[in-house]
Structure formats: structure tokens, C-alpha cells
Amino acid sequence: MIERAAVVETAVPRHVAVIMDGNRRWARERGLTSKEGHRAGGEALHATVSAAARAGIDILTVYAFSEENWRRGEREVGALMNLVRYFAMREARPLQAANVRVRAIGRIGDLPPITKTALDALVDATESCTGMLLNLALNYGARGELGDAMRAIAHDVRDGRLDPAAIDDELLSEYLYTRGLPDPDLLIRTGGELRVSNFLLYQIAYAELWSTPAHWPDFGPTLLDEALSDYARRRRRFGT
């Protein structure tokens, strides 16, 4: 049985989303390469996934690679793709042992074949797990997601499978990459920036926001507990 952290016994968010920002700045401040910063970010993800499962969070969605990230240098993009593959290969057994299921959201088909193969294997290996769901947002962009949803809806209307009058918030949600999942309750951003960077724009309409100046490689159980403690003190109104 997964042990719940005492700090969130009173109000644990069901779904936490994280913008993992600051790997490169963390590396520059230490005279390291971007590759080393991203590697340290992978270690922070490992620690955070474990802490989130212990805290009793049902769903953890992390922004691992955006569609805009392709604009970075070829060497850095290659290192990031290798890191995703390494994470998928290394974490399969630990995630199975922790009963964590993995799902990937985004335009996964456009990832390099060797990366996609490793990611698919990780998803398959954890398919029967019944604990926390780890959502890896890869080659993800919220505007692209909404565009894909609109095209799919238009096709279904054109082919007579959908009545336009039936389109509402609930139906639209079923055309998003996060179909079947509740919206995030809490959005965490590291690195001190105050923007959402094209991440889950539709889904975070009423999410609570929490930011820390700590770069992602310095994030872990202590800062997660701090974010969850702050969330527990808030009164959510959902626009009312």
C-alpha cells in the first residue's frame, strides 16, 4: 500500500500538473552543459514521481518536451530525446514496483522511432498498474491539442457521427489528449517564471497555481510538500 504523506491528509489534489523549467539555467549557474542539466532534471523527476505517489496524488502530468522545444539546437534536442529513451528504459521496473502507470500525451507519433519505441515499451510495461498515473507530455502543445480536437470534431460532424448541438465542455474534453482524466487541481511551475507556456490551456481553467524560484533539478519531495501544503490552505471557488 502506498503511504500517504502527512502534509496532504486534509486536502490532497487529485491531479497535479508540473511545468519542469530551469534545467539549462541550473546547469549554467554551475558551469555545466545543458545535457548535464537535463540529466539532473531526470533525477528530479524520479524523486518527484516517488514523492507524489507517496502523497496519494492520483495523476501527475509533467511537461517533458514541448512542440516549441524542437527549435533548440540539434545537439540539445538529440540529448533530450536520448534522455527520454533512457528514462523509459531505466524507470520501467521501479515504476512497476511502485504500481505507477505511465501514459504519454502529445503528438507522440512524431518522436524519433527509437525514442517512441522505448516510450511505448514503458507504457506497455506499466499498463496493468493500478496506482498513480504518470502522464508524460511529449511533443506537446496546447494549441496543437485544441486544433487536433477541432479537426476530429469537424470530421465527426461531417460524417454524421456527431450533432453540433451536442458539443459542450464535457464532449470537447473527450477529444483532448487527456480524455477520460479530471482536470488538474494544481499547476506547479519551477524556475521562477509566471507563465503557462502553452501547457494544458483548456484543462487548467480553474487549477490553483504555485510557482517556485527553484530550478527543476532542485525540485523534489520537500518542495512538493510545500506546494501541497499551500494548496491545502486554499479555498477553491471555480468561478463562483
Image (cartoon, rainbow, N blue to C red):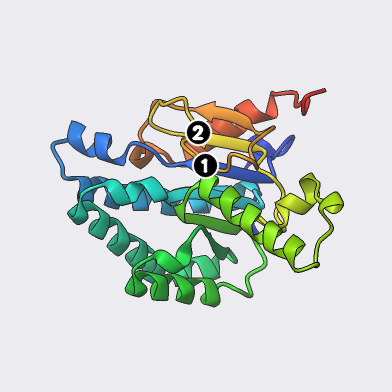
Residue appearing at x 29%, y 56% in the figure = 80
Q: Given the image, on which type of amino acid does mark 2 rest?
A: Val
Q: Which residue is mark 1?
A: 199
Residue appearing at x 76%, y 61% in the figure = 157
Q: Given the image, on which type of amino acid does mark 1 rest?
A: Phe
Judge from the rendering whether residue 127 lies leftward or rightward of residue 220; answer left or right.
right
| Along the viewing direction, whichever of 233 and 185 lies nearer the viewer | 185
Q: Residues within 10 Å of mark 1 (few under 14, many from 20)?
A: many
| Along the viewing direction, whichever of 29 and 176 lies nearer the viewer | 176
Q: Secondary structure at mark 1?
A: loop
Judge from the rendering whether residue 214 lies leftward or rightward of residue 143; answer left or right.
left
Residue appearing at x 42%, y 42% in the figure = 20
Residue appearing at x 48%, y 36% in the figure = 222
Q: Which residue is mark 2?
A: 196
Q: Residues within 10 Å of mark 2 (few under 14, many from 20)?
A: some
Can you give x and y, in whole percent of width and height, for residue 219 in the image?
A: 41, 38
- Where 12 falls versus 234 (above or below)? below
| Along the viewing direction, whichever of 116 and 29 lies nearer the viewer | 116
Can you give x and y, in whole percent of width and height, for residue 136 in the image?
A: 50, 56
Q: Residue furthest left?
A: 31
Q: Secondary structure at mark 2?
A: loop
Quick one: quadrant of the C terminus?
A: top right
Quick one: quadrant of the N terminus?
A: bottom right
- Where 72 falls versus 224 (above or below)? below
Is the Cβ of the residue at disc 1 closer than 8 Å to that at disc 2?
yes
Residue 111 circle label? none
C-alpha span from label 1 to label 2: 6 Å
Can you give x and y, in whole percent of width and height, for residue 92 in the image?
A: 46, 71
